[in-house]
């Protein structure tokens, strides 16, 4: 009996050690200039450009990383856009206007996806700021796109995953997103 208990203790210690080792394998992306940090399965590719929108000029960074698994390809990305205060600032928007702002972002994603349908949509919160989470089924490849949007002051953060709905890394990715200065 003591040998069995000793064996179980050793196996549990090994599993805990392996769990901690695996959790440290992710790449921590910290963008101080944009006020956020997030973990990716590996170092993401980064593209930075100035976008001309119908609203005004704003800066956007796009961080993207593809992480293939054995079933399907999964992708993780985070986007950042800084709007002029006069265009969009969460401190100056009432609840209905903020809701409309998020609907525009969701509708933009639906147009980009082509054939797709919304599976779920809910209001979420990050450090006292209201955001949106939407799950979209992309019909042509059976991927599920999960997107979280947060307008925090005049900064829009858009965090997304796409791929296998059973991907065990999705929650870890979303849960790792944090603001540096709030």
Image: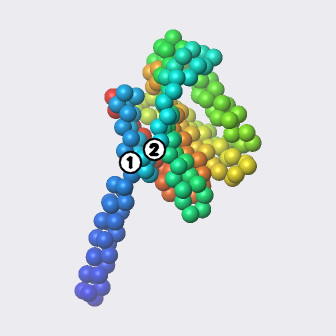
Q: Is residue 165 above or below residue 38?
A: below
**Which numbered disc flags the more N-terminal residue, 1 or 2?**
1
Q: Residues within 10 Å of mark 1 (few under 14, many from 20)?
A: some
Q: Is residue 180 above or below residue 86?
A: below
Name the secondary structure under disc 1.
strand
Q: Residue at x 67, y 31 (%)?
A: 107
Judging depth in this view, the residue of 95 and 182 nearest the camera is: 182
Q: Is residue 116 above or below residue 16?
A: above
* Left or right, 49 with reference to 128: right
Q: Position of residue 7 (x, y in %)?
A: 29, 81
Q: Quadrant of the N terminus?
A: bottom left
* Left or right, 59 with reference to 107: left
Q: Quadrant of the C terminus?
A: top left
Q: Position of residue 160 (x, y in %)?
A: 54, 41
Q: Quadrant of residue 109?
A: top right
Q: Visible in this render: residue 179?
A: no
Dot 1 corresponds to which residue? 27
Q: Quadrant of residue 105?
A: top right
Color scheme of the displayed model? rainbow
Dot 2 corresponds to which residue? 44
Q: Residue at x 33, y 61 (%)?
A: 21
Q: How many marks?
A: 2
Q: Position of residue 55 (x, y in %)?
A: 60, 15
Q: CA distance from mark 1 to mark 2?
A: 8 Å
State the mark number for residue 79.
Answer: none
Q: Visible in this render: residue 45?
A: yes
Q: Residue at x 39, y 41 (%)?
A: 29
Q: Residues within 10 Å of mark 2 (few under 14, many from 20)?
A: many
* Left or right, 15 with reference to 159: left
Q: Residue at x 73, y 48 (%)?
A: 139
Q: Are marks 1 and 2 in contact (CB under 8 Å)?
A: yes
Name the secondary structure under disc 2.
loop
């Amino acid at each position: 009996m003591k040998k069995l208990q000793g064996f179980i203790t050793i196996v549990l210690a090994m599993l805990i050690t392996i769990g901690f080792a695996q959790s440290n394998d992710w790449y921590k992306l910290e963008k101080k200039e944009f006020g956020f940090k997030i973990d990716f399965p590996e170092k993401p590719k980064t593209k930075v450009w100035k976008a001309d929108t119908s609203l005004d000029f704003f800066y956007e960074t796009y961080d993207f990383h593809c992480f293939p698994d054995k079933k399907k390809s999964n992708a993780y990305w985070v986007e950042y856009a800084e709007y002029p205060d006069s265009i969009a600032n969460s401190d100056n928007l009432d609840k209905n206007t903020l809701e409309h702002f998020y609907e525009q972002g969701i509708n933009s994603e639906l147009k980009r996806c082509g054939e797709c349908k919304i599976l779920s949509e809910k209001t979420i919160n990050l450090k006292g700021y209201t955001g949106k989470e939407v799950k979209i089924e992309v019909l042509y490849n059976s991927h599920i796109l999960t997107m979280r949007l947060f307008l925090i002051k005049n900064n829009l953060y858009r965090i997304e995953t796409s791929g296998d709905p059973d991907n065990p890394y999705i929650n870890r990715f979303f849960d790792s997103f944090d603001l540096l200065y709030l």
